[in-house]
Amino acid sequence: MSNGYVAHAAGYVDNEGPKIVSSRFVHEDGHTLARYLETGGYVGLRAALAKTPSQVHDEVRDAILLGRGGAGFPAGIKWGFCPPGVWPRYLVVNGDESEPGTYKDRLLMECDPHQLIEGCLIACYALGLSQCFLYVRGEMALAQERIAEALNEAYAAGYVGKNILDTDFSVDIVLHWGAGAYIVGEETALIESLEGSRGMPRLKPPFFPAAIGLYGKPTIVNNVETLSNLPWILENGADAYKRYGSEASPGTRLFAVSGHVKRPGVYEVEQGVTTFRDLIYGDNFCQGMREGHDLKMFIPGGGSAPWFFEDHLDLPLEAKPVGAAGSMLGSGAIVIMDDSTDAVQACLRVVRFFARESCGKCTPCREGTTWEEQILRRIYDGHGRPSDIDMLLDVADNISPGPYPAAADPSQGLEAVPFPPKQTTICPLGPSSVAPIVSALRRFRPEFEAKITARASIPVSAG
Amino acid sequence: MARLNAENLATANEILSRYPVKKSAMIPLLHLAQEQDGYVADDAMAHIAELCDVTPAEVVGTCSFYEMFKRHEVGTYLVNVCTNISCMLLGGEELLHRLEDKLGIKHGGTTEDKMFTLEDYECLAACTEAPCMQVNYRYFHRIELDEAEKVIDDLRSGARTDIPPHGTLGKVRQHIPTGRSAGIVPPEQANEAPVWLPAPTPEGEGS
Amino acid sequence: MTNVESTEIEGISVTVNGAEVLARPGELLIDACERNGVYIPRFCYHPRMKPVGMCRMCLVEVDTGRGMGLQPSCMITCSPDMVVETESEVTKKAQDGVLEFLLINHPLDCPVCDKGGECPLQDQTMAYGPGESRFVEEKRHYEKPIAISDNVYLDRERCILCDRCTRFAKEVAGDPLIHFQGRGNGTEVNTFPDEPFSSYFAGNTVQICPVGALTAKPYRFQARPWDLEEVQSTATIDSVGSRITVQSSRNKVLRYLGVDVDSVNWGWLSDRERFSFEAFNHEDRLADPLVRPEASMGSAKRDQLVTAPWSTALRRCAKALQDVDPNRIGVIGGARLSNEAQYMWAKLVKGVLGSDNVDAQLGDGLPADLVLGLPRATIDRACAAGGTVVLVGPDPKEQLGALYLRLRHAVIEDGVQLIELTPHSTGLSRYATHSLHPRPGEAGALARALVGDSVVESDIAGVAAADVNAVAATLKAGGPVTVVLGRSSAAESEDAVVDAAVALSSLDDVAFLSALTRGNVHGALDMGLAPGRLPGRQPLATGSSFSTAWPTMPAEAGFDTHEILQAAADGRLDTLVLLAADPINDFPDADLARQALENTPTVIAVDLFLHESAAAADVVLAAAGPGEYAGSFTNLEGRISQLNQMVTPPGTARPDWILAAELAFQLGADLELESPEQVWAELADLAPIYADVSPAALEAAAVEGIVVEGTSLFEAPAPLEAVSNDQYALRLVTRRVMYDQGTVLAHSPSSAHLSPSPKVALHPTDFERLGVAEGSDVSVSSARGAITVSVLSDSGVPRGSAVMVSHLEDARPYELIDATAVVNDVRVEPVA
Ligand SMILES: Cc1cc2nc3c(=O)[nH]c(=O)nc-3n(C[C@H](O)[C@H](O)[C@H](O)COP(=O)(O)O)c2cc1C
Ligand code: SF4
Ligand code: FES
């Protein structure tokens, strides 16, 4: 297709550049075993099986494969946290992709399920994980079908299950799926959910899943994209992997760029070298803002990330500089908003998401996110009171004691507050609700004030 | 309505056999119940409690946590319109309002003929394809307002049959052929490293 | 008792608000601070449950080397050189913030809330909270209190979602029948539709709810906390002796709360214990003595009992006891009494009247010599990690609720192995490593095989050889064994239990925790209310210090309850005293008990209620109940703890110990004991095991009580022969359940209606053989009679047994029992 879109992989743009995880998206039958084998499938697994498990682990550690689920923690190092001598160990694949703006794991699951399965097998082999649960977001019916099909084929062909490729490596991969709860993407909530419980996060520390996870046993939780990188790394080696991207962030990464750009889509991008400006304005990528509009703000890493502005366009797509500038790269979700966007509305919509998705465990998140939404709704609807803005900030501060991470604003002489935020809660969901509030109020407070002063004098009744 | 019927019970047992701890099968079994009845009936939950060896209160505790499980009848077609940030920017709310008008209900409601339930949904992981909606969890990307209305018309008239009734998720199920399973590993049993790992060195197992 | 000194030596140094404090290894920060006088507010944390860190109220600033940060003090264990600020600005703001969040949706209906005045939320709002609400939105609304069980109401608007009740239900009680439902701001606690929170322990959730969301029917709107007076005491309805706080208002007991005692009940109570006070407030309580007009005595048609002055009643008693051949006097009961009253009655009957026909048990217990002669265990010993518990006795869940919770915890959390040798499955079976059900009468044979050296090859007592060998191997693997020993079925003679106990006593490192269930029965045994026994665990046979101190002494060992009743029925007794005993309902041969009462010239009952046996008496002395006198109680471990007086008895009812003194006086004797102090002084003098026990010592050990050590000699009888039955018969097993129609329960308005309907339970495979259909009415018959009940299938009943619950209205299995038999066989047949 001339515009780069690939019809059967909705939103995927087959642009120029290295393809590590998205190479098969161009094939309509890329999800079948036949096409997979034809295009180098299960070569990485064979390469892994030719090594000792610890050699495989070393290869992954050398590659500095950063987790793609949000926190960006190196997989090789996380794998090393399994306590020795405690068995069994499990692998849980995080395919719950629900962060606002995030869209890439679904493509990987729909278009190249075998690549993910192969990645799981490599991880299990390396660490002695004896069973793998592939947790797919409930709302993704097609992804579930594709993975079920792929697993059925792979079992039949001897790639999964007992004595894989006639070795003594045996592992079952079980397709499991959720039922609609964003919080289940958080790894400890994911484990709770997989145990059949309500997806409420567990406090960590003291125990991270790698030490005490599923059924209280060492458990590796990795994102779909993270694992999808493994076949390539094992096939081509860590050194080849490190030829792409920057030193701190080797390889490529899928970014979903949505919102007010000419060519929104999912792009495979070299990490660390590409900048936001390249991504938004580059011909190889989104090709600029919608006709007649300018950039107002953008979210660099999913709904939980503080907002960035014009002044951040030249930052590279790399965790460290983005964090220092006051936000995060998160889940590879970049949402672009132009000057037609109402900052109050955008803020309200993201906050509403967190209020709806709070698991309800921590008092500040359960009560606070809803309260934030109610105040914002009041302001947006024109019923706000002048004191509401400060109250909103104070409520937010009780969920995430400030100063909250935020981008610098030279025009107001405000410095950047680096990521991550502090929290009075167990997991970062509650504090994430503060990101849009602080971001919007730092830059666009007059927009809020305009809505308040413009209000019809409707008194707010006490509950 | 009902406990799981014989066919679904067989499927349930197959699902249960894949988990080292029965309770883990709870969400898949709730989906199965929802597939059977279109929603999760109390009796089905009681049945699942027996299968998973927990109390019905524990089942309802889990069931009620998750958005997708409906504890009361909904329409044959569940229409989820995403209004989260990326879709909001490109007309998600207009799409929702158009469908509210079209169906004559507010979001959250069900049409009188029990054909459609409309929901104002959170991010559906199709952000670059805004605005987007799902019908029974089948995607419609970059959908125009008129196109959305046509989907409704076609479903209503029966011109469109590719979308299974509410409750059906993946139409393909996983099956592990007998003899091919590596065997589930109960957490309390295996205390030894899997066979493919080399014998542990004194300091650990070498990773 | 915990030894504070020694743990502090190896303590961890933590800086709290600038001062150094010592924490115990593994101690949670919140506990370490509290122990050192720094109270951190909390809602979800409860020291007896796993922390969840939900409410976030306990956030404090903590530095573990990586800079100050807010941490929930209920989730972090103290580590060396931790720096903690519980009062810093940041901490305060976080706590204020949490409190404000908790209050925004709280109805603030404190003036009409049972918890008002004792509510941590209210208190902390005063202490830490912001002044005025900034929340102007509509609060969450729910239907006002909903009944989640018969006795517990839930007001979801007041609920702060701390997870205490739900955690208790799952973690502590093992009855996860309430659960969080919904999500986020819509989260609520609730039950499954139409499936109530029917747990024997539900009342605990009311006690631990930090707000007024859970309330108990028996207490709702009864009083405001500031009107309440309270004392600490001991629950007397079963033999666990759970520690309680008794609260009253205007001379009426309104509430029992569990007290957290490390060695006993950990703060928990069964609902039977918790709500039993209702019975003692009941209008049916005897307020004055009753006598039967003398003229009608002995005639077939007796007159009604009428109220009489105490002088008349006591004189009538004295007359029936004075100058009577001691062998023609019998005394049954005494387990309800305090230790002090038991001693005085023992002294009166044995030391003044010279009769040894005294038995505090009603034929449904175990021989005193056995209980006092085997090495005794404490609950802590049974529950210590690394040990094994062998249950040969009644279902603890049904009869000894607080002990059940301790045992369950020990098995689940501390890895104690549980082996059941019971006639049917129990509430603990699902946690047991092995659950063996020997045929009634043959537990001894099984026990011998388990402790023997050889591998068995065929079934023993109906238990498969493989199971026998597996348990034998477990027992031999070592580690301390505690046998929880009691009488599970009244249809099997005590000899069968003795037989099993003797066999198990040959294990290395074994001790026995008695599971006799009736109130202060262990006090009664210790005080000599058993044939052949004297106070202080001394046998009558050996000449003891009591022989010289007491005016007289029985010549030889007397009758037990069975023998007393037989003698009475045969006309060999002149006077029978029922010391808070109802043999017609409690003795496992109702027929014999009835005949006994009929054929005795004078029957004296000392009691709280006019139950069936008391109603057949000639003189009824109205006694004071729990909470109406001071004294002490001995639990199943032999642990003595205080009973304190809270209210006065109804009418002119008198404490049992005063009755003994007054009777003695009427008989022209003087017990020379006028107070509990004097009783203990005499006991300390005469019985070495009580050398250190006194009211003052008990006051000093008010929390844990004092465990009395000392066993007496026990001579093992010969092993029992198995009894065969014909193939159409089923072996009868009786059991008691928590909510039966025993006297106290029957008078507890909140619990009386919870009794199950009578049924006979059979193994599923026995139905076809017997030609009966599940759910149908059947006739259960023995040589003694027949009763009709419906039949239930229960795979926890072994094949060939028929299990019936006793103490229910309508169907009384004790009507079928011949108490002289080792086992009782019945036929179960369809009714036409
Ligand atoms: C609120 C919340 C939601 C999350 N959602 C997801 C998600 O949908 N998918 C995902 O892979 N990781 C998600 N994460 C991150 C996971 O907790 C975890 O870090 C990740 O799965 C680890 O995989 P990785 O190391 O391969 O990135 C979420 C985290 C939080 C706090
Ligand atoms: S922060 Fe919110 S979502 Fe996260 S655990 Fe707490 S209540 Fe649940
Ligand atoms: S008491 Fe620590 S979080 Fe509730």
Image (cartoon, coloured by chain):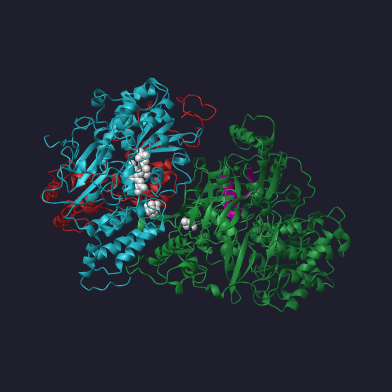
Chain colours: A cyan, B red, C green
Residue C632: x and y in percent read 71, 64
- Identify the image quadrant of the C terminus of chain A: bottom left
Secondary structure mostly taken by the magenta-highlighted segment of the chain: helix
Q: Residue C778, position in %: x, y?
A: 52, 50
Describe residue A154's horizontal placement relative to residue C599 as left or right: left
Camera sees residue A74: yes
Which of the 4 quarters of the picture holds residue C700? bottom right
Name the residue located 62 percent from the left edge and 72 percent from the top edge: C285
| Residue B22 position within the rendered picture, expressed as x and y whole percent measured from the top left | 43, 41
- Whether residue B78 is visible here, answered yes or no, is no
Q: Residue at x 24, y 66 (%)?
A: A449
Task: Establish if C371 lies above or below A241.
Answer: below
Residue A254 placement, left or right of B3? left
For this rendering, which residue is in front, A176 or C785?
A: A176
**In front of the other: C443 or C829:** C443
Q: Quadrant of the N terminus of chain A?
A: top left
Query: Is residue C295 or residue C610 the one in the foreground?
Result: C610
The quadrant where residue C601 appears = bottom right
Identified at 67% across, 58% down, the residue is: C704
Q: Is residue A118 left or right of residue C697?
A: left
What residue span does the magenta drawing correspond to? C388-411
Residue B137 falls in which quadrant of the image? Answer: top left
Residue furthest right as drawn: C548
Residue B149 lies in the magenta-colored region: no
* Horizontal relation, residue B198 to residue A348: left or right: right
